[in-house]
Amino acid sequence: MIYFVAFIIVYTLHVLLKLNWYMTAVLGVFACVMIPFHKKRYEGYLKNKKRFFEVSSYLDTLLYAFVKEEKVVLAIWDVSQTLPQGEMKSLVEKALDYMQMTFKEIAVLQEGLRLIEREYPCQRIRDVHQFMTHVEYYGGEIERPVTLLLADKGRWERRIQEAIAQRNKQFVDVVLSVSAALMICGAIVYLPVMDVDISQEWIVQIFSVLVVIINDWIIYKAQKYLMVDWIQIQLTESDDYYVKKMQELREFHEKKEKRLSIFLGGISTVITIVFFLCGNEWFVVLGLLLTLFLFNQHRVGKNLMRKNLVKQIKYAFPNWLLDIVLLLQSENVQVALQKSKEHVPGVLREELRLLINRLEQQPESSEPYHMFLKEFGIPEVHSAMGILYSLSIGNSGNADKQISELVEKNLTLLDDTERELLKSSTSGMYVLFLLPVVVASFKLIVDMVFLMLAFVKVPVV
């Protein structure tokens, strides 16, 4: 069926662009070659979308089952009975068999759950599994943490569903842009201009085929934005990258960089003066702008680095804070901070180490909490650390309410930040939307050149 649709498209292009049969045959071969690639990306899109909904259903079912059973094995058994037939159900049954048939005492639950995590590498699955095994081994409250996890999962699910719908809409826009561009390219060869027909010129024919090939490549690239593994979509750089950037910011030598700015700005000033003396006014303007930038390059570089880190902190901090809140169900604040080191995001790793060191020296002081990420001036972070300090000294008369408000604010922060990152990650789709118009413009230039040559009766080789 798909090859029949391709045949219809190729024949339509043959008529629209007035292709000769040789070029049409080339286009047909190209279509046959590209069909498996397009099909593979489409199947990848469907598979990743299905995996996302499987994870969403699994998390809902598992959390409600754990509230009911309060045991990991029983909760997994309930999930295995509830999920529909499919890859997720098979994995859950495999994990359940491992837990029931393995008789060693150490980490049997974690190893069983890890069977699911390996096939569905989703951070929220790992968080839920970690919470359940922690409660199983050490005890602690269940209902409130589950409510928090369900709230986080609900926001995450809505964000991804909106992102899928948005990318589908943008992909349709790209296809419509390609279609419109091809129709414009076809219109020029049908213009009734003094019975002049340039469509059979070989260069025009070749450019017509090239336009189709480039537009197909544009659609193929746009498909990549749909073929996203939503359960582990990477919105930012790796943890190690941000560890390095945090270190660079801390080691930023203001005086040294300022001296470099003065040196570079001085060179640019001399060059600008030379341009002025030579009377090159446009170069003088460019030189003045470059000089202004170079004199301030140390400030610009530091501000850009800081801005990128603030964006990442706003993304990482709520996830880390949720981990802290879950640990607080069975631990005090300082122990929870210690245990959170195992899963702390890279951008917070050094700050957490400094916080723990300061608390060892000043366990009763509020200063270590207030110094946490102080130089970035993020209100949500300072508010959260203030509440953690109140909890650490037992000075909170309504700790449950404060924690709930704390988590709600930070989930909102995570929601806003991740929506922005998801939107930024599709910026390339807009470029692909505009690209067919650019390609069509080049094709029209070629056609107009041949029309002009036909009018002046210049022979074309």
Image: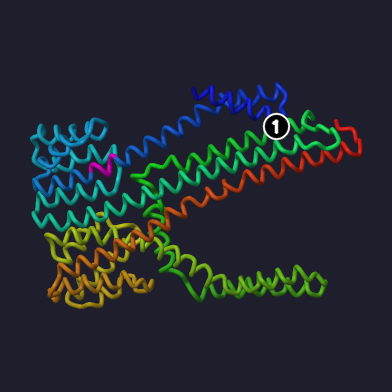
Q: Is residue 234 left or right of residue 337?
A: right
Q: Is residue 19 left or right of residue 40?
A: right
Residue count near mark 1 (Cα–Cα under 10 Å), binned few <14, some 14–19, many ≥20 = many
Kind of residue at badge 1: Leu
Q: Is residue 55 magenta?
A: yes
Q: Is residue 390 left or right of residue 345?
A: left
Splitting the image into 4 quarters, where does residue 359 fall?
Answer: bottom left
Q: In x, y percent, where is residue 212?
A: 64, 34
- In terms of depth relative to the viewer, which is nearer, 324 or 410? 410
- Residue identifier under label 1: 17
Q: Residue at x 28, y 68 (%)?
A: 354
Please count the marks in the image.
Answer: 1
Q: Residue at x 24, y 74 (%)?
A: 386
Most frequent secondary structure within the magenta stretch: helix
- Compared with 434, 265 (above or below) is below
Q: Residue at x 65, y 38 (%)?
A: 182
Instruction: Kindly state the secondary structure of the residue where label 1 is placed.
Output: loop
The C terminus: image quadrant: top right
Region of the chain picked out in magenta, as a range: 54-58
Splitting the image into 4 quarters, where does residue 49 fall?
Answer: top left
Splitting the image into 4 quarters, where does residue 401 fall?
Answer: bottom left
- In terms of depth relative to the viewer, which is nearer, 193 or 261? 193
Q: Residue at x 33, y 44 (%)?
A: 231
- Compared with 323, 31 (above or below) is above
Q: In x, y percent, where is residue 71?
A: 9, 45
Q: In x, y percent, where is residue 61?
A: 19, 43
Q: Is residue 233 magenta?
A: no
Tell which residue pokes out farthest to the right in this image. Answer: 457
- In terms of depth relative to the viewer, which is nearer, 40 or 15? 15
Q: In x, y percent, where is residue 425?
A: 46, 51
